[in-house]
Image (cartoon, rainbow, N blue to C red):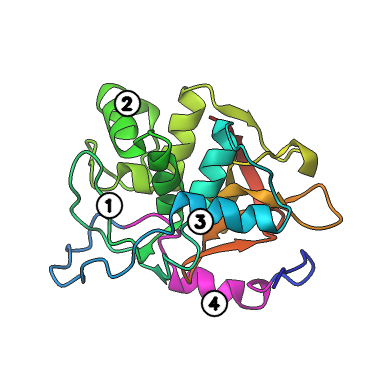
Amino acid sequence: MRQSAAMKPWSNCIVTFLFIVSVACAPSPTVTPSPTIPPPTLTPIPYNTVVAKISSRGGVTPPLQDLGTRIAIAAEAQVGVTTIYDSAYVRLDYPNGDVPIERGVCTDVVVRAFRVVGIDLQTRVHEDMKKNFAAYPKDWSLTKPDANIDHRRVQNLATYFTRMGKRIGADDDDEKFKPGDVVAWQLSGWMQHIGIVSAEKIEGTDRYYIIHNIGSGTHKEDALRWFKIIGHYRW
């Protein structure tokens, strides 16, 4: 069921949520990696299946050739597959490392979608941080890059996108957000959130749905204006 912006299903519990998700899409480097994380039990919905599903609703019309729409479709493929918000620090393979597909944080939505179109943000962010570590935030008191987690932090992704010339604005009008765009929001204090603009508009508006994970897995919701927008990026 589509949610209107006025309903804001998270708004009634956002204060409690901010305390629970204390790292806000940024896994802590001090947490000991868990050896008991179960292996993936789900697989991403095939890209073509999601295309057909959206096309049947009139959201988009094939062929879907532009990069932004491909990113948006790859993000939507995670809906119903990633069902757990899990901010634990995990040692990952490098490159192409990932946590089990059924779990993750907001940044994992972006990383996974970009990988589908051939862009490995784990490698790109880590390699840029190795060469330009001083240009990145020091919110976690790290003294060197960490390929397990660098790309899983909102502030680092935002910095990387900006350094690559992908920032196109911040609190733009609704119609300026296009499928596949990446949006960053300010939550509380230093905590930030990130998501991807969907390929489907909310009926009767110029606003697209947002695909994100803010506490209970990946969802597609009318969330563009839930929080203060601090970054708008387009690859």
Alpha carbon distance from label 3 to label 4 = 36 Å
Confirm or deny contact between disc 3 and disc 4 (CB under 8 A): no
As shown in the figure, which amino acid type bears the numbered disc 3? Thr
**Three-letter code, disc 4:** Thr
Separation of marks 4 and 2 at Cα, in angstroms: 36 Å
Please state the horizontal and vertical placement of residue 216, each as a whole percent of the image: 48, 72
Give the residue type that dot 1 points to. Answer: Asp
Secondary structure of the residue carrying numbered label 3: helix
From the image, tell me which residue sits under label 1. Answer: 98
Q: Is residue 24 magenta?
A: yes
In terms of secondary structure, where does tag 1 sit? Answer: loop
The first of marks 1 and 3 along the sequence is 3
Q: Which residue is mark 4?
A: 16
Q: Determine which of the numbered discs, if any, sits on residue 49 in the image.
A: 3
Looking at the picture, which amino acid does disc 2 mark? Asp
Residue at 67 percent across and 72 percent down: it is 11
> Which residue in the protein does label 2 denote?
128
Mark 4 nearby-residue class (10 Å; few <14, some 14–19, many ≥20): few
Residue at the spot 25% in from the left edge and 54% down from the top edge: 29
Magenta run includes residue 79: no
Work out how far the residue at label 1 is from the one at label 4, CA to CA, in angstroms.
Answer: 28 Å
* Magenta segment: 9-27
Q: Nearer the viewer, mark 1 or mark 3?
A: 3
- Please report whichever mark, 4 or 2, sits nearer to the chain's N-terminal start: 4
Residue depicted at 17% across the width and 63% down the height: 32
Q: Nearer the viewer, residue 214 or 12?
A: 214
